[in-house]
Image (cartoon, helix red, strand yellow):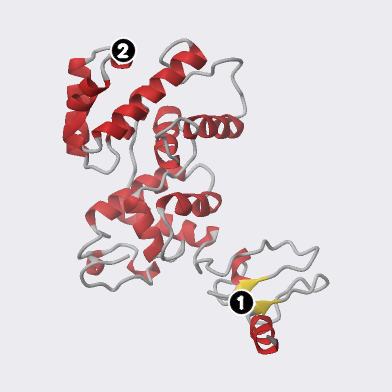
Amino acid sequence: MRKAREKRRAHTVTYSPARRKPFFRPAVLPGDPTSAIMPGSRGTIMPGSPTPSFGRDTAPNAHPGFVRRLLVALARAQGPVRWRRENPVICLVGTILSQATNDRLAERAWRALRARYPAWKHVLSAPHAGIERAIRMCGLARQKARAIRAVLRHLRRTRGRFSLAAPRRPVRDPVRRTEALLAELTGIPGIGIKTAAITLMFGFGADLCAVDTHVARILRRLRVVPAKAAPDRAYRILRPLVPPGRGIELHLRLLRLGRETCRALRPRCGSCPIQALCSGPGMRGAAP
C-alpha cells in the first residue's frame, strides 16, 4: 500500500497557489493552459489555481493553440471554404439518412423518400414498413425510419408544424439558443450529438464543429483527443478548443482531409498538408 501511494504521488503534479507555476518545465507549448500537464500524467490543482484539472488520459495536443495552428495549415493548403444554409428540417432528416453510409446512398434514399411521400405529413402518417422500403438502400432502415418519425412527431407536438423555428418566444442570445436546440434535438430518440450539431451548423449557421468518423480519426491521430475517444467524446473535448467563429470551417476542412488524405486505410501521409503537426501513424495499413 505504501509503495502504491508513493508511486501515485510521484506521478502527481502539484501547484503552488502563490507562484502559480508548475514545479517542472512545461512539456508541450509555453503559454498554453495544458502545457503544465505532462502527457499521460495526472494533474491536481491547488485551490486558487487558474488552470483546470486534466484527466490522466488527456491528449497532449488538446489546447486552443494547436487547433489554431491546424486551421492555418489547412487553410493554406485547401483555400477558401464555401457552404450554404439548408432548411433545418431537411438538413436533420438528410443527416439521419446519412448515418453509417456514404453520400451517394443517402442521396438516393432522400430522393426515394420524397418521391413516395412528398410532404412531411405523408411521412408521419405512412406505415412504418413503407418508409423502411423507401430508404432501405442507405442501410439501418428500421432505425432511421423510427428516428425520422420521432422527429416529425416532436415538431408537430411542440410547434404545431414541421419546423425547427422557436416554439415560443425566440431566445435572442445565439449561444443560449444553440444550447437549447442541442438539448432539444438530442432528447429525441435516435438523434445523437453529431446529427444535432450538423443540423444546427448548416440549418442555423451555429458555431459548432460536428465530429463524425473522419473528423474523430484525424483528431485521434493528431493527439487532440485520446487514442480511443469515440466521436461523441471527441466532440466534447474539441468544442472549447475551437476559435470563435471557426467551427463550421474546421469541420469542413477536416472532413475534406479525412476523405482525400487522412483515410482510415492506407492514409496518404506523404502528401498530407498537416504532416508537420501529426504524430500519428506514419502509416501503413489501417490506423486508429
Q: Read off the residue under disc 2.
A: 125
Inter-mark Cα distance, 1 to 2: 61 Å
Q: Residues within 10 Å of mark 2 (few under 14, many from 20)?
A: few
| Position of the C terminus by quadrant | bottom left
- SS at badge 2: helix
- Measured as percent of width and height from the top left, residue 82 is found at 33, 38
Q: Report the residue marked by disc 1.
A: 26
Q: Please identify the quarter of the rendering in which residue 47 is found.
A: bottom right
Q: Give the residue displayed 43% in from the left and 17% down from the top.
A: 163
Height in image: 167 above or below 246? above
Asked if one can make out residue 87 in the rendered structure from this viewpoint, the answer is no
Q: Residue at x 49, y 39 (%)?
A: 207
**Quick check: 188 left or right of 54?**
left
Mark found first going from the N terminus, 1 or 2 = 1
251 with respect to 119 (left or right)? right
Q: Nearer the viewer, mark 1 or mark 2?
A: 2
